[in-house]
Amino acid sequence: MSFFPGTFAGRLCITRGDGWQVALQKPENALRLGLFIRSVVKSEFKTDTRVSIGLGTVDRLEPDNIVESTGPAFILSGHGLEALAKGCCIAMHTASDDPRDRLIVQLFDL
């Protein structure tokens, strides 16, 4: 994506037909990118997407097929997506699980 040069670690992958996953080299852009993708989906496709950000380490990175990558960052993201409350569209989980992080993301979800 030209909007976030040097941010991606590989290519965005589509999963199960309606899901997507991406890994970032610059995790400081995770929330901004999540909000950007959600905004594009809403404006261009007139629908919404759920975003779960997992901040953590990566054990194995498969840049050509991100869905085959492993590590705590991917596990945290997956658990966050499963735990999203009804009506919520964005979550962020870290290894420290700091409640302040969740509060900030909940405000962005509004």
Image: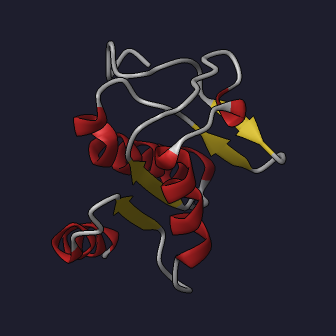
Quadrant in which the C terminus appears = bottom left
Q: Nearer the viewer, residue 39 or 30?
A: 30
Where residue 80 sits in the image (x, y, percent)?
Answer: 51, 67
Q: Outermost residue toward the front?
A: 59
Is the residue 10 above or below the residue 48 in the image?
above
Q: Outermost residue toward the right?
A: 16
**Which residue is pictured at 49% across the width and 48% down the height?**
72
Quadrant in which the N terminus appears = top left
Where residue 69 sits in the image (x, y, percent)?
Answer: 64, 32
State the scheme by which the image is colored. Answer: secondary structure
Q: Outermost residue toward the bottom?
A: 86
On screen, residue 40 versus residue 20, left or right, reads: left
**Which residue is pictured at 83% across the width and 48% down the height?**
16
On screen, residue 93 versus residue 65, left or right, reads: left
Number of marks in picture: 0
**Which residue is pictured at 58% across the width and 26% down the height?**
60
Where residue 41 sits in the image (x, y, percent)?
Answer: 54, 48
Is the residue 74 above or below the residue 88 in the image?
above
Figure quadrant of residue 5: top left
Figure quadrant of residue 79: bottom right
Figure quadrant of residue 56: top left
On screen, residue 18 versus residue 64, left or right, reads: right
Q: Nearer the viewer, residue 39 or 27?
A: 27
Q: Nearer the viewer, residue 100 or 33?
A: 100
On screen, residue 52 versus residue 27, left or right, reads: right
**Which residue is pictured at 27% across the width and 67% down the height?**
105
Is the residue 75 above or below the residue 23 in the image?
below
